């Protein structure tokens, strides 16, 4: 049927290991993604029992799906109506788990955890995303590198998936050693102190808040991060460019577009896209031009902006949310990942920048000789609509985050907060924000006033609805300062939510 989707083999591993990144991406650009994923559809309709039943229940005849246009009319598959509706083996190619050799578990933030089997060979597309970061941003092919995996190790997708992809790069010939302390700070510091002096650079890979904790705690323990030429790889959360800048200062970074990168990934689809020096430079420009950002993204908050390979993960949009197709042990065909966001072609984003006066890479803060990858962009705000409505304005957690990430305030707070509206005895609404303090920081009124004013300033700057809808006398939020790990707002051991209804 289609050689594009024959089972990965040792030859494909060898092809990945022996083929330079430029050549791999050139091969992918020669593929028509629409035809590739049409072929995956036909194979899945024939070989995946659950998908065959899913189509039959909707009276779809696979033999009639022969064009990209027909493919785009196929029903979306989701967790509720597909992943949880059929037994796990029936969702796999061949109706069996025997071709899978590892499994990841989704976080459960949207409900019951879901198991995602895969084989090591399906990691190759994801390893290319890591290779883009390690080569294009960190120049790892030229510098001996210690990669310290700070994601939690276990069934969660982050730690072991990251480790495996880094091992693939080391096997490919990159001068890369992979250390796996997981999210144990004492072990991370032991690794850094013992091994980092022997390498030209050290890469920390983890969730943004935890990487920040590692950096701050390391400084408190006498680690001078700048000695190790650190680089950072993030995943899992949207963060502001102010936050990137502050973290960069603490590690001695002088090149923000090349010293860090965020991955857009999911347990079900692996890494779907990655920040590049170009996408970071564009995002940093947009952070300083909030009106342009609102025009481009349609909201008063800045999403994660990454580039992706459409021959690896094929994105579509559905009612302002993202749909993705990709090959895996459980094939994804128009899978509704329910992340709010959108897609932009390479030409679209450059046309937009040109309309706003940006004509060159230098105007974005990149070297003139930098060669960007001609890949499309996907932007993602995160899952469902975690906004708070206040005087008709949608207040986003991302807006509040920027207010807390100002240099003086970061010395007091952990970065966690809970945003909610409350009603006074007189029936007036107030915007209340519970803010978690760092351990051993004592609350005082001047601190609360400074935080409230900082958040108000950023809301006015970033959120046009807030600036125009909210009466001036109601624009300053009420701040309650909470001790670290306060059980009411910041209990330990559970996934934190930044808003309350």
Image (spheres, grey):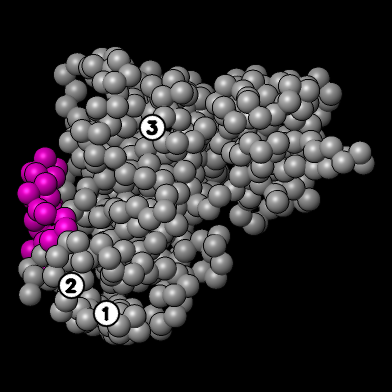
Looking at this rendering, what residue extends furthest in the right direction? 425
Residue at left 31%, top 64%?
334
User: Sequence-wise, which precedes: disc 3 or disc 2?
Assistant: 2
Front residue of 202 and 276: 276
Identify whether 210 is placed above or below 463: below
Few, some or many residues within 10 Å of mark 1 (<14, 14–19, 20+): some
Q: Quadrant of the N terminus?
A: bottom left
| Callout 2 touching callout 1 (CB < 8 Å) | yes
Question: Which stretch appears magenta?
Answer: 8-35
Give residue 65's mark. 2
Q: Is residue 27 magenta?
A: yes
User: Sequence-wise, which precedes: disc 2 or disc 1?
Assistant: 1
Give residue 60's mark. 1
Q: Is residue 316 visible?
A: yes
What kind of element bears circle 3?
helix
Question: Where in the figure is residue 281, as x and y percent of width and height?
Answer: 33, 25
- What distance separates the C-alpha of mark 2 from that of mark 1? 9 Å
Left or right: 415, with 75 as reference point: right
Pointer 3: what residue?
296
Q: Is residue 50 magenta?
A: no
Identify whether 273 is placed above or below 79: above
Front residue of 363 and 73: 73
User: Sequence-wise, which precedes: disc 1 or disc 3?
Assistant: 1
Left or right: 490, with 256 as reference point: right
Few, some or many residues within 10 Å of mark 2 (<14, 14–19, 20+): some
């Amino acid at each position: 049927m289609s050689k594009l989707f024959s089972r990965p083999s040792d030859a494909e591993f060898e092809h990945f290991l022996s083929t330079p990144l430029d050549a791999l991406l050139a091969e992918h650009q020669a593929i028509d993604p629409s035809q590739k994923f049409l072929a995956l559809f036909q194979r899945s309709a024939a070989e995946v029992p659950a998908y065959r039943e899913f189509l039959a229940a909707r009276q779809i005849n696979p033999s009639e799906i022969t064009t990209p246009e027909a493919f785009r009319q196929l029903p979306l598959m989701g967790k509720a109506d597909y992943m949880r509706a059929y037994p796990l083996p029936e969702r796999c190619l061949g109706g069996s788990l025997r071709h899978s050799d590892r499994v990841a578990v989704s976080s459960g933030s949207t409900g019951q955890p879901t198991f995602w089997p895969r084989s090591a060979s399906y990691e190759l597309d994801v390893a290319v995303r890591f290779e883009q970061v390690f080569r294009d941003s960190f120049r790892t092919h030229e510098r001996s590198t210690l990669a310290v995996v700070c994601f939690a190790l276990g069934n969660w997708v982050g730690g072991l998936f990251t480790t495996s992809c880094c091992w693939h790069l080391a096997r490919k010939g990159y001068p890369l050693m992979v250390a796996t302390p997981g999210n144990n700070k004492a072990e991370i510091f032991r690794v850094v102190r013992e091994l980092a002096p022997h390498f030209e650079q050290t890469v920390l890979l983890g969730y943004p808040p935890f990487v920040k904790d590692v950096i701050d705690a390391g400084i408190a323990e006498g680690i001078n991060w700048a000695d190790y030429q650190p680089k950072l790889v993030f995943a899992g959360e949207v963060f502001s460019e102010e936050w990137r800048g502050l973290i960069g200062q603490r590690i001695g970074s002088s090149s923000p577009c090349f010293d860090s990168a965020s991955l857009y990934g999911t347990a079900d689809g692996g890494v779907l896209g990655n920040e590049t020096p170009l996408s970071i430079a564009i995002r940093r420009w947009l952070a300083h031009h909030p009106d342009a950002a609102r025009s481009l993204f349609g909201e008063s908050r800045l999403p994660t902006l990454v580039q992706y390979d459409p021959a690896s993960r094929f994105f579509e949009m559905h009612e302002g949310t993202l749909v993705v197709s990709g090959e895996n042990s459980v094939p994804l065909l128009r899978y509704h990942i329910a992340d709010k966001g959108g897609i932009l072609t390479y030409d679209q984003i450059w046309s937009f920048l040109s309309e706003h006066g940006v004509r060159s890479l230098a105007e974005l803060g990149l070297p003139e000789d930098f060669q960007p990858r001609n890949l499309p962009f996907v932007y993602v705000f995160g899952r469902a609509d975690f906004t708070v409505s206040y005087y008709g304005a949608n207040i986003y957690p991302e807006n509040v985050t920027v207010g807390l990430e100002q240099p003086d305030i970061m010395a007091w707070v952990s970065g966690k907060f809970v945003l909610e509206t409350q009603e006074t005895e007189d029936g007036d609404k107030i915007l209340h924000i519970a803010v978690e303090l760092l351990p051993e920081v004592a609350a005082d009124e001047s601190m609360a006033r400074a935080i409230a004013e900082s958040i108000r300033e950023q809301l006015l700057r970033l959120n046009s609805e807030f600036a125009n809808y909210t009466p001036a006398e109601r624009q300053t939020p009420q701040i309650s300062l909470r001790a670290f790990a306060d059980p009411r707002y910041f209990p330990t051991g559970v996934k934190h939510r930044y808003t309350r209804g």
